[in-house]
Image (cartoon, helix red, strand yellow):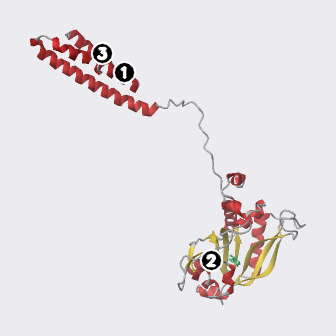
């Protein structure tokens, strides 16, 4: 039977209704408004209400139903936020999960070391584009068209058949040219960067590698200055007892040109398998900047002279850590990279 007491009791129940979880809300909905719910039952019994009371009870019953639906909706929304905030039942007293730390790549470590050494000598860092034109990689460096020295560096062309084709730079000497074009004299720069050559990949060669180019131009720069700069660098890099040796060589952009060897830091000159029994390790090419190269970039070669040098970063890193296969540097094998976790000297 529908009675005023029953309806009041249900209003009170609604007022006091509290739920912590979505499951409890659903249970309350079924208990009140479900097919066999208490409010649904009152609607069934409404049929038996006296005619003159029907109007009054009908109104109150509808209010009760609406209040119950609103309350259920409100509880649903409230427990949803709780679920999102706290649903995973995380234990906030647990120790945090350690975030694995990356380490710097050996090539980056050595590049930074080389740059830091030359910075101490007063060199600035200069950078240039990896996609270069023929002029900056070859022409301005005294490689005339069809010069056989161009074959020393197998080139990836980006656009061919052009008078000044675009290509992937084969050496960072191109940044020498860009520095001479835009910097005021005297110039003292170090140019680290990535270079590309069309070479078969092996333990000793790769189609992508890194170089550091150095350039110093001023009045009265001599070969003795070059030798001193390289000696100081070699001693900073490989240790204070390091010796250097210069062997005559040829590069189109330097005259005279030389290759530099350092005394083997493994056997200290006695001969081992790293230096192939010679006691010496080749580390770079260098020379006095050819007057043609100075003039091509608008520098008066009667007044100014300079030296340049270029070295492969992977090569220096291989010698420093006795890595015998260049490919390790490009394969991102974590077992290899992790060995350099503690290689940064602070
Ligand atoms: N660019 C040369 C190369 O990639 C390296 C080099 C040699 C750079 C002699 C120089 C230099 O500046 O003087 O093989």
Whether residue 116 sits left or right of residue 297 in the image: it is right
| Measured Cα–Cα span from mark 3 to mark 1 | 14 Å
Closer mark to the observer between disc 3 and disc 1: 1
The tag earlier along the polypeptide, 3 or 2, is 3
Q: Position of residue 232 (x, y in %)?
A: 76, 70
Camera-side residue: 71 or 128?
71
Closer mark to the observer between disc 3 and disc 2: 2
For the residue carrying disc 2, how many other residues have a C-alpha within 10 Å: few (<14), some (14-19), or many (20+)? some
**Extreme right residue here?**
270
For the residue carrying disc 1, how many other residues have a C-alpha within 10 Å: few (<14), some (14-19), or many (20+)? few
Q: Is residue 313 above or below residue 307?
A: above
| Quadrant in which the C terminus appears | bottom right
Quadrant of the picture in which ligand 1 is shown: bottom right
Q: Is residue 290 above or below residue 281?
A: below
Q: Which residue is mark 3?
A: 13
Q: Position of residue 271 (x, y in %)?
A: 89, 67
Camera-side residue: 158 or 123?
158
- Secondary structure found at label 3: helix
Whether residue 69 sits left or right of residue 97 in the image: it is left
Q: Is residue 128 above or below residue 91?
A: below
Q: Position of residue 339 (x, y in %)?
A: 72, 52
- Secondary structure found at label 2: loop
Q: Which residue is mark 2?
A: 155
**Extreme left residue here?**
52
Q: Which mark is residue 209?
A: none
| Measured Cα–Cα span from mark 3 to mark 2 | 85 Å
Q: Residue at x 87, y 69 (%)?
A: 279
Camera-side residue: 343 or 82?
82
The tag earlier along the polypeptide, 1 or 2, is 1
């Amino acid at each position: 039977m529908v009675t005023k007491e029953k309806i009041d009791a249900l209003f009170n129940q609604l007022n006091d209704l509290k739920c912590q979880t979505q499951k409890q809300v659903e249970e309350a909905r079924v208990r009140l408004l479900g097919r066999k719910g208490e409010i649904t039952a009152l609607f069934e019994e409404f049929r038996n209400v006296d005619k003159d009371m029907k109007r009054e009870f009908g109104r109150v019953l509808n209010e009760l139903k609406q209040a119950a639906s609103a309350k259920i909706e409100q509880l649903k929304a409230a427990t949803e936020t709780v679920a999102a905030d706290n649903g995973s039942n995380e234990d906030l007293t647990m120790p945090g999960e350690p975030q694995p730390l990356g380490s710097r790549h050996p090539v980056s470590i050595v590049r930074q070391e080389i740059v830091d050494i030359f910075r101490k000598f007063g060199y600035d860092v200069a950078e240039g584009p990896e996609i270069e034109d023929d002029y900056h990689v070859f022409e301005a460096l005294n490689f005339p068209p069809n010069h056989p020295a161009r074959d020393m560096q197998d080139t990836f062309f980006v656009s061919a058949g052009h008078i000044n084709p675009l290509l992937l730079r084969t050496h960072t000497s191109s940044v020498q040219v860009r520095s001479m074009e835009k910097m005021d004299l005297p110039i003292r720069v170090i140019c680290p960067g990535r270079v590309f050559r069309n070479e078969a990949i092996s333990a000793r060669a790769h189609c992508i590698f890194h170089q550091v180019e150095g350039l110093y131009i001023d009045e009265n720069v001599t070969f003795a200055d070059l030798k001193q700069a390289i000696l100081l660098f070699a001693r900073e890099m490989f240790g204070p007892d390091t010796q250097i040796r210069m062997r005559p060589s040829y590069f189109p952009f330097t005259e005279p040109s030389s290759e530099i060897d350092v005394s083997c830091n493994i056997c200290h000159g006695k001969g081992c398998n790293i230096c192939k029994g010679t006691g010496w390790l080749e580390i770079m090419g260098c020379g006095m900047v050819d007057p043609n190269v100075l003039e091509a970039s608008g520098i008066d070669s009667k007044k100014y002279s300079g030296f340049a040098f270029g070295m492969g970063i992977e090569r220096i890193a291989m010698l420093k850590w006795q890595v015998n296969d260049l490919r390790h540097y490009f394969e991102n094998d974590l077992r290899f990279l992790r060995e350099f976790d503690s290689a940064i000297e602070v």
